[in-house]
Amino acid sequence: MPLEQGNKALKSDEHDSSITAYTTKQDNVPKLPIASDEGFSNVIRDSNQNYWFTKQLSSNHVEVYVFVHSLAQLRTFQVNGKPSFYEFPNSVCIACEGEEWNGWIYEFAKDDPRMIHQWHVKGIFCDLKRKGNQLIVSSYHVEGDEALLTTFGDTGKKVTPLEEGYSPVNMMIADEGLYVAALSISSARQDQILLLDEHFQVKNSFKLDFSPRTIYSWSGLLIVHGINGRTGKSDQLVYICPKSGQQEKFPIPSSELLTCTDQHLTFYNAESKILAIWDHEEKEIISMREAERPYASNHF
């Protein structure tokens, strides 16, 4: 694949193999040199069998711990803000929502976990993806009231303004470009999905009559799940053909979209404790059952 999504933990991500923001199940976790009553959380394992976990030091400072599997060694690092973890083949990135509308990105090597890069991002951090050697970060610049795209790569740092009056919510990479879910800050504008070209310029957009939260793809179509602005319920699901722009919307129960596979979408309603399976081909819910919220794997 020419583009790498990255697997994300602690928050929801649009890639199929991602982890969503649930309590992390900790089966088969080795005895780590920490006490359960010391305030540690978010135990996650990467593909090199290293364990990553965090401890809140203050409102905007977090200690990140990594237990290096190959050395049986514990290392610590401090980051600014609320962390989200992303795993790539050779590294782990920690993206943080920092103080005063600033974001921070920290990159660590996986084979010998040490910090190899640290970057500042203007605005409120929203999402992170990788394209080749480039890291792509979306953020909302409060002072300028605009969505920003910041890239870090071999040629340095570049900031690209996207749309005024919008905040980027989610990103998805595809062969045809980079999709960005853009949430309107003002009710005078419609929410939309932006399609960016290889230079991160807008080459197409798809207007929505609801607020997008997550983007997926299936069989050449975009799948957008979001919130009804009139009711506040997460009951909006639409399939979009990128070539024609045609949209097909379906009514669904208000719920959280957990995962997307080649066959199904999985939804969960926390109030009713109902787990629902949506079939792409049938375009309907084919299974509903009462269940506790599914645990995420302790893998990224």
Image (cartoon, rainbow, N blue to C red):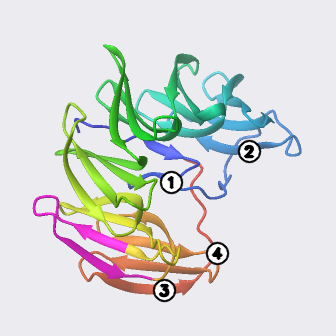
Mark sitting earlier along the chain (4/1): 1
Tell me if label 4 and label 1 are in contact, CB under 8 Å. no
Looking at the picture, tell me which residue is in the foreground, 86 or 215.
215
Q: Which residue is mark 2?
A: 41
Q: Which residue is mark 3?
A: 288
Report the residue at 45% width, 73% height from top: 228
113 left or right of 151? Answer: right
Report the residue at 68% width, 52% height from top: 26
- Residue 74 screen position, x and y as percent: 72, 24
- Residue 176 screen position, x and y as percent: 16, 45
264 left or right of 116? Answer: left
Evaluate whether residue 300 shows in this view.
Answer: no
Q: Residue 292: which disc?
A: 4
Instruction: Give the Cα distance between marks 2 and 3.
Output: 32 Å
Instruction: Give the Cα distance between marks 4 and 3.
Output: 13 Å
Nearer to us: label 1 or label 3: 1
Instruction: Give the Cα distance between marks 1 and 2.
Output: 17 Å
Tell me if label 1 and label 2 are in contact, CB under 8 Å. no
The residue range painted magenta reads: 237-252
Say what amino acid the circle numbered 2 marks. Ser
Instruction: Give the Cα distance between marks 2 and 4.
Output: 21 Å
**Is 177 inside the magenta-drawn segment?**
no
